[in-house]
Amino acid sequence: MTEAKLGLILTSVAVTVVAVALYRQRALGRNGLVTVIAATAAIFAAMFFTQ
């Protein structure tokens, strides 16, 4: 696994953790949480498998 892929994994996890934290603080709605997770997963998959 290259450093770029490792960085991509860590960044995706960090974005998801921040989104969940915002949801738990009621700063982000359920639809927003689902949108963030779906967008992060789509970008992760596209970038991870094309490198």
Image: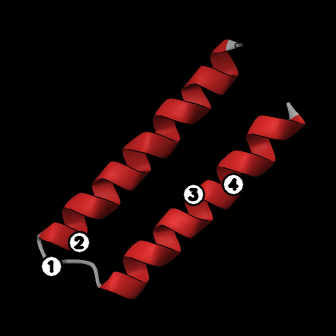
Looking at the image, the residue that sits furthest to the top is 2
Residue shown at 59% from the left, 22% from the top: 6
- The residue at which mark 4 appears reads as 43
Report, in whole angstroms, how far the alpha carbon at label 3 lies from the one at label 1. 20 Å
First in sequence: mark 2 vs mark 4: 2
First in sequence: mark 2 vs mark 3: 2
Report, in whole angstroms, how far the alpha carbon at label 1 lies from the one at label 4. 25 Å
Report, in whole angstroms, how far the alpha carbon at label 3 lies from the one at label 4. 5 Å
Quick check: 16 left or right of 35? Answer: left
Q: Which mark is residue 26?
A: 1
3 w.r.t. 30: above or below: above
Quick check: 18 left or right of 48? Answer: left
Q: Amino acid at mark 1?
A: Arg
- The residue at which mark 2 appears reads as 23
Rendering quarter of residue 4: top right
Quarter containing the C terminus: top right
Q: Are marks 2 and 4 in contact (CB under 8 Å)?
A: no
Dot 4 falls on a residue whose secondary structure is helix
What percent of the width, then of the height, locates residue 19? 33, 62
What percent of the width, then of the height, locates residue 26? 15, 79
